[in-house]
Image (cartoon, rainbow, N blue to C red):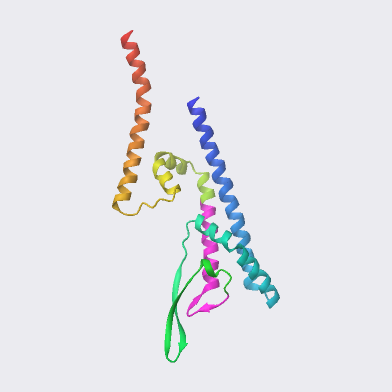
Amino acid sequence: MYLYAVFLFLLGCFIFKILLNAKNWYFLNKYKNLHKDYLGADNEEAQNKFGWEINKKTPEIVKLFKNAGLKDTYFSFMENVGFGHAKENALGIFDNLACLDSVGHNSLPIKVVKYFTKGLGIYEMRLKEAFSPFYWVNVILFLPQEIVTYLGISFEGKQAKFIVRLLNFLYWVFIAICKVLPSLHHHLILLMS
C-alpha cells in the first residue's frame, strides 16, 4: 500500500511537471512570435497594435521569465541633459519588452529576443528532465534541497548551504530508520516469542 501511494505521488509529479512546463513553453513561444511580429512590423499602425499587445502581456511574459529562473538585467547608459552635462540612467529588460530603441551600444530588442530564447530553452530542458530517470533519482535523494529551492529560499552562503546539507543528511537518516525499524520490530517480536 505504501509503495502504491509513493508511485501515485511520483506519477502525479511527473504529469504535473510535463503539463506545467509544456504550458509555459507554449505561452512563451506564443509571446516570442508576437514580439517577432512587433519587431518586423512594416508600418506604424501594425507596430502600435503589436506594441499594445506586448505591453498588455508584459506581466505574463515577466512571470514566465521569472518561472524559468531568469533575472532582470539592468544596464546603464549616459544621457546628455545639455550644457555639457550627462546623467547616468539604467534600463531593465523586463520593463522595456516593447522598446524598439537602441540605447548606447545596447540593443534592447536583441536582448529581449535572447531572453525569449533562453526561457524556451529552459522549459525544453525541464520537459526532457521529466523523462530522465536520473533526474527523478536525484529529486528523491535530495528531496529537502528540492523543497527549499521550490519554496524560493536562497541557499547562497556557507550557513545556508550547511543547513541544506544538514536537512539532506537528516532526511537520509530518517529514511534509513524507517527502513530498519519495521524489520527490527519484527525480529524483536520473534525473539520474545
Q: Nearer the viewer, residue 17 or 77?
A: 77
Magenta span contains residue 10 = no
Tell me the residue at 35%/35% (across/down): 172
Residue 62, given in percent of the width and then of the height, sits at 54, 61
Magenta: main secondary structure: helix
Would you identify the image quadrant in which residue 117 lies? Answer: bottom right
Image location of residue 52, percent across then percent down: 65, 69
Relative placement, left or right, of 82 versus 187 is: right
Quick one: 32 or 48, which is closer to the camera?
A: 48
Identity of the residue drawn at 41% across and 46% down: 148
Viewer-side residue, 164 vs 176: 164
Judged from this view, the residue extending furthest toward the bottom is: 83
Please state the horizontal and vertical placement of residue 108, each as a whole percent of the image. Answer: 53, 73
Magenta range is 100-125
Q: Is residue 168 left or right of residue 34?
A: left
Compared to residue 85, the image places residue 37 above or below, namely: above
How many numbered marks have been drawn onto this rendered protein structure?
A: 0
- Is 112 in the magenta? yes
Q: Is residue 40 above or below residue 170?
A: below
Residue 69 picture location, percent across and down? 47, 56
The quadrant of the picture occupied by the C terminus is top left
115 displayed left or right of 39: left
Residue occupying the point 68% across, 77% down: 44
Residue located at (37% from left, 27% from top): 178
